[in-house]
Image (cartoon, grey):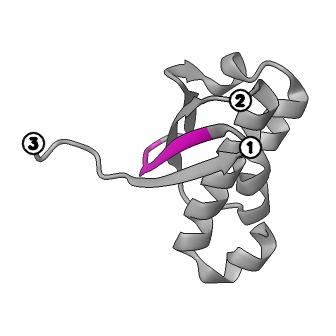
Amino acid sequence: MSDKKKYTETIGRRKTSTCRVRVTQASKNSFTVNDKDAKEYFKTPVLQKVIHDALELVKPEGKYEVSVHVMGGGIHSQAEAVRHGLARYFAELDQDSKDKLK
């Protein structure tokens, strides 16, 4: 039981899409969506940019493992829900970045 990773969970929503974002401190960066690599799930460069917007604005120190479970809506709405969930996580982590993320 002690070897389980501790994570922080936030919820992101957009239109009819909902996602659960879990962020864990890790030794290397990884991003999975519905148990697939994020680049495999969101195939177009536009959608990949949308999901990484919050990370690019905040530029967090350290490495993170991001695990997302998303459902409902269309693929673009799902990407925006993921962006919302990540923005909520980073706004909770650092109040100064909240204005940047709005």
CB atoms of marks 2 and 1 within 8 Å = yes
Amino acid marked by disc 1: Lys
The answer to whether residue 27 is above or below residue 92 is above
The answer to whether residue 80 is above or below residue 59 is above
Helix, strand or loop under label 2: loop
The N terminus, quarter of image: top left
| Mark nearer the viewer, 3 or 1 | 1
Which residue lies at the image location 58% right of the left edge and 77% below the top edge? 94
Task: Identify residue for label 1.
Answer: 15
Could you tell which of marks 3 and 1 lies nearer the N-terminus? 3
Callout 1: few (<14), some (14-19), or many (20+) C-alpha neighbours within 10 Å? Answer: few
Q: Position of residue 17 (x, y in %)?
A: 66, 37
- What's the CA distance linking mark 2 and mark 1? 7 Å
Please say whether residue 25 is one of the residues in the magenta stretch: yes
* Main SS, magenta residues: strand
Q: Position of residue 96 (x, y in %)?
A: 67, 83
Q: Position of residue 95 (x, y in %)?
A: 61, 81
Quick check: 67 left or right of 58? Answer: left
Amino acid marked by disc 2: Gly
Amino acid marked by disc 3: Met
The answer to whether residue 43 is above or below residue 31 is above
The answer to whether residue 61 of the structure is visible from this angle is no
The answer to whether residue 53 of the structure is visible from this angle is yes
Task: Identify residue for label 2.
Answer: 73
The C terminus, quarter of image: bottom right
Callout 3: few (<14), some (14-19), or many (20+) C-alpha neighbours within 10 Å? Answer: few
- What's the CA distance linking mark 3 and mark 1? 38 Å
Provide the residue span drawn in magenta: 18-27
Could you tell which of marks 2 and 1 lies nearer the N-terminus? 1
